[in-house]
Amino acid sequence: MFNEHDDTGDKLEHAYFCYLADKFERDPALLSKALANVQRWLSLDSHGAKHLHWWRTLIDDALSASSGLARLCSVLRADDEETLFLKGFAPFPGILSREESERFVCASRH
């Protein structure tokens, strides 16, 4: 039976963003892929442009200073309502390897 309080998907999504934060801390150069996603998406459609500009600023700051990287990672690890909404526009496809992505997909099915 469906449990209206089942938050497995929320926990998995939170774990995904925390994993991304860990990965960016180890290799901030990966953020260039995310920045390219933002640029490509903005050139294709203006849907979510405000949020994509927000991500672009956050990523630019992360690429230019350790304090910016710390802020980005803090946002990725946050679990508040506003941050959850903004994560819906997160430009991180292509950051995880196939194996890393499959761990999150497999976990969501179990």
Image (tube, grey):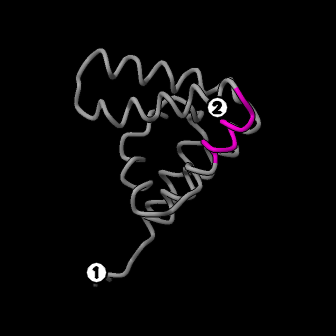
Q: CA distance from mark 2 to mark 1?
A: 41 Å
Q: Which residues are magenta?
A: 65-73
Counting from the top left corner in percent of width and height, residue 23 is at 69, 40
Counting from the top left corner in percent of width and height, residue 69 is at 68, 37
Foreground residue among 109 and 4: 4
Instruction: Please tell me whether residue 2 belongs to the stretch shown in magenta.
Output: no
Q: Is 60 rendered above or below residue 105?
A: above
Q: Residue at point 69% right, 43% down?
A: 70
Q: Is 19 rendered above or below residue 4?
A: above
> Mark 1: few, some, or many residues within 10 Å (few <14, many ≥20)?
few
Q: Nearer the viewer, mark 2 or mark 1?
A: 2
Residues at discs 2 and 1 in contact (Cβ within 8 Å) = no
Q: Residue at point 23% right, 22% down?
A: 45
Q: Residue at point 58% right, 20% down?
A: 32
> Mark 2: few, some, or many residues within 10 Å (few <14, many ≥20)?
many
Label 2, secondary structure: give it.
helix
Main SS category, magenta section: helix
Q: Residue at point 39% right, 77% down?
A: 6
Counting from the top left corner in percent of width and height, residue 8 is at 45, 69
Label 1, secondary structure: give it.
loop
Left-right relation of 35 to 61: left
Residue under circle 2? 62
Residue under circle 1? 2
Foreground residue among 86 and 103: 86
Among the two numbered marks 2 and 1 on one chain, the one whose residue lies closer to the N terminus: 1
| Residue type, mark 2 in image | Ala
